Image (cartoon, helix red, strand yellow):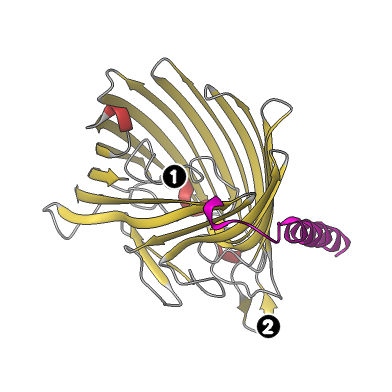
Amino acid sequence: MKKYFVFMSFMIMAVSIALLSIPVKASAADLQVKWFGYSQITVEGGNGVSEKYSDPQVGADRVRIGYNATLGNVFSKLQIDFNQAGVKSEETTVINKNVLTSASNTNILPNIIKDADVGYKFNNTASVKAGIFKTPVGMDFNFSGKKLDITKRGMEKALVLERSLGVMVSGRKIAGGFGYDIGYFNPTTRSAAVSGGTPGDAKAYAVRGMYDMGKMFHLEASYGKSETAGGYLPGNVASKDYSVLDVGAAYTIQGATLKTEYIDGKNVEGVDGKDQSVWYLHAGYQFTPMYEGVVRYYKGKADASNGTSTSLGNTFIGLNIYLNPAKKYASRIQLNYVLASGDKDTWNGLSGYTDDAFLAQYQVAF
């Protein structure tokens, strides 16, 4: 309890300093608001998408609009996703024939609200924000959804802590290229790996350290935990805490991109001994300003509480077509073919394609 008290005292002090430091008077002319939005329309097919329907299906990944606002050192963000349901206590997602159900907005905010935060930036060394936003666990997860190398977030997405209401202190460009995030959150019930937890009784926290060498090299490591991840069991017995460790690196030079990431989750959904890990290797090369080829290989391992273990591989072979190379993500087509391998019939992990699939996406953004 002592370490939690110290941690919370630090967070409360940081927020208090931020609030006291905000100037009382500010001219309306200083307010800067930048709107953004994008739509991602999809065509998907193959047995990995649906065994029941053989014809391609038209859908959408993200349909979003939002803004970033600044007023001196004060900042705020709001992002809405119209492809999400509004207010409901459970979110059911079908990923490659696996049905994932989580109390995705319990004690948080409606699912349609992706981000809603306010904050204050002291300098590059420290800023603080509060609201609902991404927890700092997962390298690929913390990339914008409109800048992904492949059409989907991959097998590691189910293991991150996702978004939650909380407070986070961050710093960037320290001593050249170091950065950090320290966050305290409500239970992360938007995560597929967390199905329970009540604020006040349970909490979540996450920390991340990173190093950047310009835009050429990025390295990060993060750790997070969400308490009582499966809620309370019969007899008022608390389920286990879910913990997750993530390490990632990315290298980009002269049109070539290399990435790797490893994530390891313990006590998935609060079940003792239910563990899962995922790693991937990624290579991309931009042949021309308009065309980029990518290959990404995922390998997942899932352990059940009874000791049963299965593994699954997903290989993404893709082509990214930038219709306006001067603004890469303003108009883009992504084509992916996914090859499934391993224990396709017995895979018991949270996500992953258990059969081959074709994925196409057309994105328009501003």
Residue 7 in the image: state x and y as whole percent: 81, 57
Whether residue 177 is situated above or below residue 165 in the rendered picture: above
**Is 25 left, or right, of 218 in this rendering?**
right
**Observer-nearest of 133 and 65:** 65
| Image mark for residue 144 | 1
Q: Residue 4: say if magenta.
A: yes
Quarter of the image where one finds residue 218: top right
Q: Residue 257: say if magenta.
A: no
Q: Quadrant of the N terminus?
A: bottom right
Whether residue 145 is situated above or below residue 103 in the rendered picture: above
Q: Quadrant of the C terminus?
A: top left
Residue 285 in the image: state x and y as whole percent: 35, 21
* Range drawn in magenta: 1-30
**Observer-nearest of 91 and 96:** 91
Q: Amino acid at mark 2?
A: Asn
Numbered disc 1: secondary structure: loop
**Is 327 left, or right, of 73 in this rendering?**
left
Quarter of the image where one finds residue 254: top left
Reading the image, the residue beneath label 2 is 236
**Is 328 left, or right, of 133 in this rendering?**
left
Whether residue 211 is situated above or below residue 146 in the rendered picture: above
